[in-house]
Amino acid sequence: MAHLLMVESWVGSMSRLLPRAIREGGHEFTFLTRDLHHYLRSAPEGTGHPLLAAHNVLTADTNHIEPLLPFVERAHGALGFDGVITSCDYYLPTAARIAGRLGLPGPSSAAVENACRKDATRRVLADAGVPGPRFAVCADWAEAADAAREIGYPLVLKPVDLCAGMFVRRVDDESELARAYRALADFHVNARGQRREPVVLLEELLGGPEVSVETVSFAGAAQVVGVTDKSVSGAPAFIETGHMFPAALAAADAEAAAETAIHALKALGLDGVVAHTEIKLTADGPRVVEVNPRPAGNRITELIRHVTGIDLAAACVDVALGREPDLRRRATGLRSAAIGFLVPDTGGVLESIDGADDVRTAAGLLELQLSEPGKVVKAAGSNNEYLGHVMAGDAEGLGARDRVETLLSALCPKVVGR
């Protein structure tokens, strides 16, 4: 039995998938957090959160690495950790620093920091010749306005240190740029109490479909597990509305996307990670959007497991322990699996979601998860406001996405004004 230190977590599906993978691997974990209530608030009433089933729960200020390191060293001396893990982007650099300090397996902390900072990623990949959009990193409004004119509209404004598509906006002219810039500038602290870097990333708007390449790196070699597609809506925001694995791509396009992702991982120096690299398939070839040094969110890992039998949450645990992950494909009876999200376009209070009973009995359904009545709803501006999801599979071919779209169209959320 190995003992992992889990440093914070997302409160979504990965907060359940990672503890499950640890338990099914015969291991245990200690959970380290600065705020237990952050997780208790996300658990359904009357239930406990899976993270709090940890062997130990430690409380410390995970937002300040220098005082945290000696605290973790003392905990390591008492409890004996074999690996360090997290699913939350905001703590990936922290986990890497801790693993390095304790002499445990893990990726280079510099590589993780460069992958988690979008501006640093752009610089590293550009220096290595990995294709991406034209970009500029701007410290103030004057720099942003000048850079936008040089890059040319339309373009994309991004924070360098937020997740889930927060404040990522398409802008078509200077007035739209000003609105997006002001909205981001007014957001000083993220959801975990960390102060944001007050710089803005501007990027050329890339055309073409977007996919993600799921990889596992171990002992200096990166293996591609597959390519996932993505649908996006909500302009000028970029809200992920669904995914299918495997993506319905020509073999040459899938291979080009995979090769580009591998080049990006090598340029960043990432090893010992499960990674989720987002790629735009432009008319001029693949272009890197982002490199995420952690398993994919939005239950993409479950799509992959349903189709291939490969458990990327378990692979994440293995590489954190310095063990070679099991990436053998197994027959599952499915050729494709897809997920679609119920995205609110208005604010208020959720009264009901009609059509759920019919969807629940539909052929091919793998998962149906819906928000409960009474939920306070905001019109979606990022990937944080979903009202639920539908997941379905197809045993015959690449029909899972069409099946999910049909099931989603049968769901009708009723949101009433507050």
Image: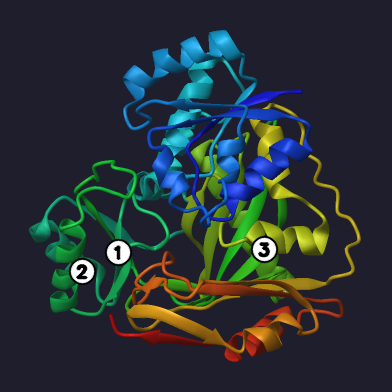
Q: Which label's residue is closer to the chain start, 2 or 3?
A: 2
Quadrant of the image containing the N terminus: top right
**Residue 167 tag number:** 1
**Residue 260 visible from this viewpoint:** yes
Residue type at numbered disc 2 = Ala
Coordinates of residue 100 in the picture (x, y in percent): 51, 20
Taking the view exactly as shown, the residue that stands out farthest to the front is 46
Q: Nearer the viewer, mark 2 or mark 3?
A: 2
**Residue 180 tag number:** 2
Residue type at numbered disc 1 = Phe
Could you give the CA–CA distance between mark 2 and mark 3, rounded to whole angstroms?
31 Å
Residue drawn at (59%, 90%) of the image: 409
Secondary structure found at label 3:
strand
**Residue 227 tag number:** 3
- Residue closer to the observer: 296 or 126: 296
Badges 2 and 1: C-beta atoms under 8 Å apart?
Answer: yes
Question: Which quadrant holds residue 357?
Answer: bottom right
Label 2: few (<14), some (14–19) or many (≥20) C-alpha neighbours in 10 Å: many
Judge left or right: residue 291 versus residue 309.
Answer: left
**Residue 402 visible from this viewpoint:** no
